[in-house]
Image: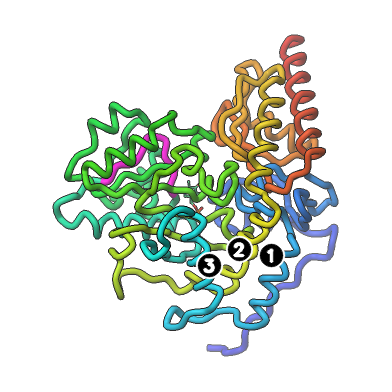
Amino acid sequence: MSTTPQPVPPAPAPGTGPSWTERYAAAVMNTFGTPQRVLVRGRGAHVWDAEGRQYTDLLAGIAVNCLGHAHPAVVSAVTQQLSTLGHVSNFFTTTAQVELAEALIRLVHPGLDASDSRVFLASSGAEANEAALKIARRHGGGARPRVLALENAFHGRTMGALALTHKAAYREPFEPLPGGVEFVPADLGALQAAMGEDVCALIVEPIQGEAGVRPLPEGLLTAARRLTREAGALLIVDEVQTGMGRCGTWMAHHLLAPGTTPDVVTLAKGLGGGLPIGAVVATGPAAQLLGPGQHGTTFGGNPVCAAAALAVIRTLRDEHLPERAAALGRRWSGQIAALPGVRGVRGAGLLLGVVLEEGAGPAAEVQAELMDRGFIVNAPCPDTLRLAPPLVLSDADADSFTRVLGEVLASRASRQEQA
Ligand SMILES: *Cc1c(COP(=O)(O)O)cnc(C)c1O
């Protein structure tokens, strides 16, 4: 047996050999389909592909890059932290981790006594929801085996988070999943009927992002708080996509249900501005349910990610970006909703679902045409485009998208007339 390491094959010279997409297909597991472009660089709300073409990024890594690409505050925080202390185990703590936990408690529950809340730091949204589910189970003991989630919910792809995710195509190939989860329509009567003293928790997204940017019906979140409190169940609010200022307030539940205090709030996506980090903010008795040895993760609270999140929070606050998201979102969604071919715009702030008229054809085709015209969006469902741009998007970039979307929809309509 040879102990000599195998040499790594050299990359082909530029312009020869297989393309990046071919090499991707030969080396990367096929979980995401064929990548649309090979991206090499980003700055603010713009990215560039390997062929030098520029795009306006209206998806921001799916609601992640809230400060855009290569924001100097994040670059400097990460660089400084990494060159000082890049990682420690959770046998230790770091100043960045403690400062972040304190900041998150104040952000999520601005009016509340901070001493009532505790934070668990993770590395993704799914992991934050896994921890929330473990908190729910601890609350349930044997007497409360049921967990309620909403129809069309998306809470992530790990086994626990997947059990809370409604789409059968995501769930069924991986059954059996953790049991006890029931899906309830986002409707007061249905929630009322399902709630009971054998329920340990209800988990909701204030605006269902992956389902096509669908806000909960008005008043439902407030009612969910009342119903869970009466039944003694926990209310878990998944703000992974909607939090961190994206919907025009720090948390979307601040907008949809002012004054409501969930027992557990989960965060990720925008929190790290591009660095992988998730968080669970638990309040009241729920904050005490996970004890020593009951949960853990090696990377959770990593100081580099925590420093990035602190820089994100500071910049969002100093540059009033939640307010900017609210104002730009209001104006932009009004203008987009007025375009021929657009049936309406759902969502809040800079998390918007543009619902197309049937005549516009599949949203995935419109998305591809927009990409060819230099705009990155996505199509979470067959009739809807999702916009989740950096909160630093300029008025000019927003306006040029509105113009180009209008042109794309008009040309599709006239092509259809000729056909
Ligand atoms: C994206 C998302 C998740 C999963 O987060 P990951 O970081 O991809 O694991 C969970 N909940 C919601 C609402 C999301 O949008």
Q: Which residue is mark 1?
A: 74
Residue mark closest to the camera, 3 vs 2: 3
Pointer 2 or 1: first along the chain: 1
- Per the rendering, the mark at residue 58 is none
- Residue under the image location 63 percent in, 60 percent down: 312
Q: Which residue is mark 3?
A: 100
- Residue under the image location 51 percent in, 39 percent down: 255
- Residue 174 or 128: which is nearer the viewer? 128
Pinpoint residue 162: horizontal percent, then vertical percent.
39, 49
- Per the rendering, the mark at residue 275 is 2
Residue mark closest to the camera, 1 vs 3: 3
Residue mark closest to the camera, 2 vs 1: 1
Q: Indicate how the structure is coloured in the image.
A: rainbow
Q: Amino acid at mark 3?
A: Leu
Pinpoint residue 242: horizontal percent, then vertical percent.
53, 45
Per the image, is 154 magenta?
Answer: yes
Pointer 3 or 2: first along the chain: 3
Mark yes or no: residue 312 visible.
yes
Q: Is residue 118 above or below residue 54?
A: below
Q: Is residue 265 above or below residue 287?
A: above
Pointer 1 or 3: first along the chain: 1
Q: Amino acid at mark 1?
A: Val
Q: Quadrant of residue 400?
A: top right
Q: Is residue 213 above or below residue 79?
A: above
Q: Quick one: SS at disc 3?
A: helix
The reply to whether the residue tagged 1 has its Cβ within 8 angstroms of ligand 1 is: no
CA distance separating discs 1 and 3: 14 Å
Q: Quick one: SS at disc 2?
A: loop
Q: Which residues are magenta?
A: 147-155
Q: Mark 2: give few (<14), some (14-19) or many (20+) Cα within 10 Å.
A: many
